[in-house]
């Protein structure tokens, strides 16, 4: 695990005597550090939510079919995949703090480029670059989150992921406002970029600095480790969950517009309700796990995802679909924080390695799921494609039950 370089405290407490311990620091300083990290997660989530909320507009403006949109959406995960071999090395070389700051700014900057798209290949190129810097931002911020966790006795990773989800809800509300005002995606994206710049400027000095040299030494000593079986199965679960989450981000608006036939002002309703329950579920994650245990929560989450998607397929009307999307939101909410916590506590794999693998697999599912939807929808229709993804939820429950992945001290 990366070691903290406490010299960053001099920027926060210039008059205080710096000690290599946070135990004697006042709780308000710890809270400010926690909120700074949460706001970076918020900014990252807000960027993606802003893009996802305007997909229907860009689809219509560029006259794209479902298959065309599916193909173009593939450029985002391609960018992610190409960046993966480099992102972990860059984070190790320059530190998660630095890459979190610059990665977030570049991620928001390339969001504005999507609004400039006048042809399909412009949008594809923009998504590719959006994916590249999204990967840098994701790896760096999650690594920074693990470092920040070292300062606290109680878990805080769930709070960070909850902030990402809350940003999705906030982004949906902003999208509704932008649609009401009749503002173009470009103006919308520029406003989002300026908002992220404010977040970065206000919170950068509170991010935790790590001792980069020692991190590099550990990487050299550790070398490549093939993931053990439990990490592979955790990756499968996170892939299925994030694929289900990804289609809600990218296709919920299209589903409400083309299948539910919702009024123009309510096209983003399903996505908004999905984000409400997902954000709420993640903030409740620690409480639910403490009461019922992670094994039961993951099994219930998988079942909830499947039921939600099939309700939307069988009853494609405004109220049932809104309820169904809320079920999917609550279903996916608990999976990622629990999986990340389990992976981070494995004794057979270094924490940074485990989180990087799980994070990469998770977002791969998040980004590959939506393009697959487009292809299935082109062959059949959007309802059948949602039904196909619905199988993922029950698969999560079966794998968790059979492999007993979240039973304490259990190894496969």
Image (cartoon, helix red, strand yellow):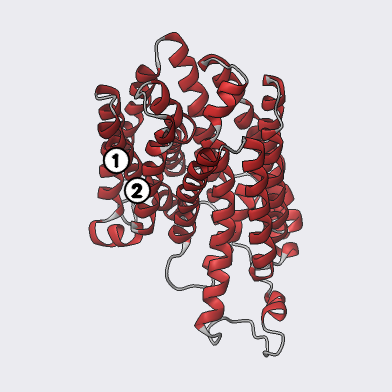
Residue 161 at x, y percent in the picture: 47, 54
Measured as percent of width and height from the top left, residue 156 is found at 46, 64
Q: Do the residues bearing badges 2 and 1 touch, measured as CB atoms within 8 Å?
A: yes
Using the numbered discs, state the Cα–Cα distance from disc 2 to disc 1 in whole angstroms: 7 Å
Which residue is found at the position 63% from the left and 63% from the top? 2
Q: Quadrant of residue 304?
A: top left
Look at the picture and state if 289 lies above or below 176: below
Residue 398: x and y in percent read: 28, 35
Total marks in image: 2
Q: Is residue 25 above or below residue 347?
A: below
Residue 118 image point, x, y percent: 71, 24
Which residue: 70% across, 50% down?
A: 103
| Outermost residue toward the front in this view | 181
Describe residue 272's horizontal placement relative to residue 186 as left or right: left
Q: Residue at x 45, y 73 (%)?
A: 153
Would you say residue 226 is visible in this rendering?
no
Say which label, 2 or 1, has the lower sequence index.
2
Q: Name the residue carrying label 2.
A: 277
Residue denoted by label 1 = 327
When the figure is inspected, residue 197 is found, relative to residue 133, above or below; the finding is below
Q: Quadrant of residue 203?
A: bottom right
Residue for point 46% across, 22% down:
373
Secondary structure at badge 2 equals helix
């Amino acid at each position: 695990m990366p070691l903290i370089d406490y010299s960053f405290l001099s920027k926060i407490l210039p008059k205080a005597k710096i000690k290599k311990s946070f135990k004697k620091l006042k709780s308000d300083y710890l809270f400010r550090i926690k909120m700074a990290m949460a706001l970076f997660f918020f900014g990252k989530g807000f960027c993606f939510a802003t893009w996802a909320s305007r997909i229907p507009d860009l689809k219509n403006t560029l006259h794209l079919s479902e298959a065309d949109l599916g193909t173009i959406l593939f450029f985002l995960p391609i960018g992610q995949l190409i960046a993966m071999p480099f992102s972990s090395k860059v984070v190790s070389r320059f530190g998660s703090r630095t890459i979190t700051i610059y990665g977030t700014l570049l991620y928001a900057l390339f969001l504005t480029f999507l609004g400039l798209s006048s042809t399909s290949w412009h949008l594809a190129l923009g998504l590719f670059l959006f994916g590249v810097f999204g990967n840098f931002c994701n790896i760096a911020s999650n690594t920074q989150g693990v470092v920040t966790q070292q300062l606290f006795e109680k878990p805080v990773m769930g709070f960070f992921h909850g902030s990402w989800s809350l940003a999705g809800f906030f982004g949906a509300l902003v999208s509704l406002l932008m649609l009401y005002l009749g503002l173009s995606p470009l103006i919308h994206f520029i406003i989002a970029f300026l908002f992220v710049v404010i977040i970065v400027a206000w919170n950068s000095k509170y991010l935790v600095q790590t001792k980069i040299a020692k991190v590099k030494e550990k990487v050299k000593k550790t070398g490549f480790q093939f993931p053990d079986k439990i990490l592979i199965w955790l990756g499968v679960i996170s892939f299925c969950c994030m694929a289900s989450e990804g289609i809600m981000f990218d296709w919920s608006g299209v589903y409400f517009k083309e299948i539910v036939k919702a009024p123009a002002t309510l096209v983003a309703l399903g996505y908004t309700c999905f984000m409400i329950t997902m954000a709420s579920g993640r903030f409740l994650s620690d409480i639910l796990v403490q009461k019922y245990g992670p094994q039961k929560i993951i099994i219930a989450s998988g079942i909830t995802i499947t039921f939600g998607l099939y309700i939307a397929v069988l009853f494609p009307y405004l109220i049932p679909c809104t309820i169904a999307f809320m079920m999917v939101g609550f279903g996916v909410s608990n999976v990622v924080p629990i999986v990340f916590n389990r992976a981070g506590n494995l004794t057979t794999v270094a924490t940074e390695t485990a989180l990087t693998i799980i994070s990469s697999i998770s977002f791969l599912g998040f980004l590959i799921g939506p393009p697959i939807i487009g292809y299935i929808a082109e062959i059949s229709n959007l309802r059948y494609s949602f039904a196909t993804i619905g199988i993922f939820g029950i698969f999560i429950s079966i794998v968790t039950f059979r492999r007993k992945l979240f039973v304490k001290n259990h190894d496969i």
